[in-house]
Image (tube, rainbow, N blue to C red):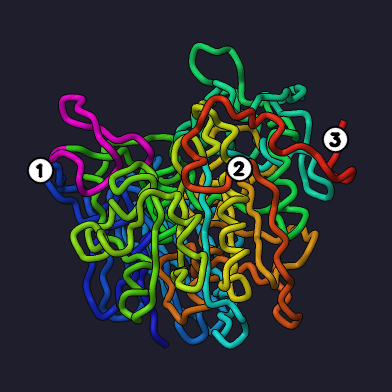
Amino acid sequence: MRLRVWLAAGVALPLAVACSFAGQSAAPHAQTGSNAQAQNPLSVMTSPSPLQFSAAGQMGSVTLVEQNPPSSAVFSLNSTACTDADVLTVSEVDSQHYQVTSGSSLAGCTLIASDGTNRVRVAVNPTTGSFTFPIPTAPPRRGQSESRIKHVVIIVQENRSFDNLFNGFPGADTVRTANNMGTMVPMTQEKLNGTLTPVHTHTTWFKSYDGGKMDGFVNAEQPGTDKPPFAYVPHDEVANYWKLAKAYGIGDRMFQSNTGGSFAAHLYLIAGQSDLGDVLYIPGGSGSNGWGCGDPPGSHMDQVEPDSPKEVAGPFPCLDLPSIGQEMDAKGLSWRYYASAQESIWNEYEAIPYVYSGPDWLNDIVTPETRILTDPSGPSGTLADVTWVTPNWEESDHPGANGGLYGPQWVPSVVNAIGESSFWSTTAIFILWDDWGGWYDHVSPPQLDSMGLSFRVPLIVVSPYAKAHYISHVQHEHGSILRFVEEQFGLGALAASDMRADDLHDFFEFNKPPKPFTPFPTVLKRPEDFKYPGAIDLTRAGELDDPDDAPPR
């Protein structure tokens, strides 16, 4: 049996090598600059089985991953009442069970065990504690030959929950009343380009979730507005999104992998992990073009405390994490990341030193983002094996975005550029919104580890092999997209999220011939169109032309 140790959100370390954890972060980040700080470690003793780890008043977790067959279990220590150092011993009883034993000094602590699907909390006995935990089996990985996909495109939009953007979508799970601290209140309409911008930090997530009751979203209310985020976007403003979803597939159980904002969410889409928040602190208040290795020395992100609403000072935003881009480079595969500028807030690879300080920074970060509208076209068109497409602010659907109606023009224009190219027959396109943006959603997310899952976000799957008019009720997360990529190109898992996640294959019918592409009508089509001219009236650009698309009453 071969075991590997994973951090709570983390990097795999072979058991043959000694390692240590930062107790507050539960993930090792290479901190650059003068801000690197020593933290109380959660040590993992790797000699010999049974595996042991200790904690002194800290939060820590370890995931054991058995390779044959692949399986995993996460053991976390809730440090609320833990004040003394002690050792937890984790050993394999048989092929189906782990044994976890603690000593007397962990009295008052709670042990949290997760198999990637269910979460079990076990109070440690004041004298001694021991329990047996089933060894789960990870979803089997598919071979590359099971798919006809040669190109994967990931279009990332911003800050919308499922109840907010697809409210009333036929066959999907949405509601028109919200739970406000136990009182049901009607949801109201809020324009896509409205000014209301709910708070969506880890702290507000924790309060909104409220132990699974989903009744604390009033805590995400934008300060000074007296308007809680119990709102949904009028259908006629997002009719283009509904058309995409009806023509292909949409998932109403797509959960964000992390309980925070965009920076960490985008990290999960390239690296499968993060324990960071969304606030960047710049010394002296100087400006920053993005979140990443180019920020001034002494800058740092906030960092979430697992299973806690707290956010504390974290590392410099330059993180030595393995990423899909690095794995693809190692196999000689191509990738591109389209962004509005090289140093922009949604260019997540700016935070990965391997990319920022290497040739990929110039070769694989493509700016501006509108180049995706022309790159695939014509006989000399290009489309990488894996492509991320991030928006400009105006195209993003982010609440409060200037001219925020451009997203429903931008996304189908990108789909059209690929659909009308020679790459259509071998491409899968995933359209998702990176985080919930603070908006109300009524479905309580499963808690799989100390970072999530978070609330639902929309997911649309477009491909010549995608099922038509399909609504997926299968549990998905950000790691599902990484797992799909990994299976298509024979890549290894990066972290716990893509190891435990499904692979989105319920959306596809690879045993059927590819469907021809029918373009979606848009007003803006070319790169020069996305200059946001105020004279163009986009309020009716997504006008309904299908009676079945009529907005629900």
Residue type at mark 2: give it: Gln
Q: Earlier in the sequence, mark 2 or mark 3?
A: 2
- Name which residue lies at 52% across and 68% down: 152
The C terminus - image quarter: top right
Q: How far separated are the C-alphas under marks 1 and 2?
A: 44 Å
| Residue at numbered disc 1 | 34
SS state under label 1: loop
For image coordinates 73% across by 75% down, the residue present is 509
Instruction: Calculate the distance from the C-alpha at mark 1 to the C-alpha at mark 3.
Output: 55 Å
Image quadrant occupied by the N terminus: bottom left
Instruction: State how many labels appear.
Output: 3
Q: In the depicted view, which residue is nearer to us: 213 or 250?
A: 250
Which numbered mark, 2 or 3, is in the foreground of this view?
Answer: 2
Packing grade of label 2 (10 A; few <14, some 14-19, many >=20) is: many
Q: Residue under circle 2?
A: 409
Residue type pointed to by label 1: Ser
* Residue 139 visible in the snapshot: yes
Give 90 or 378, whichever is nearer the viewer: 378
Residues drawn in magenta: 277-298
Q: Which x, y percent locates residue 407?
A: 57, 40
Residue 194 part of the magenta segment: no
Magenta span includes 280: yes
Which residue lies under the disc numbered 3? 552
**For residue 485, side relative to residue 539 (left or right):** left
32 displayed left or right of 518: left
Alpha carbon separation for disc pair 2 and 3 = 22 Å
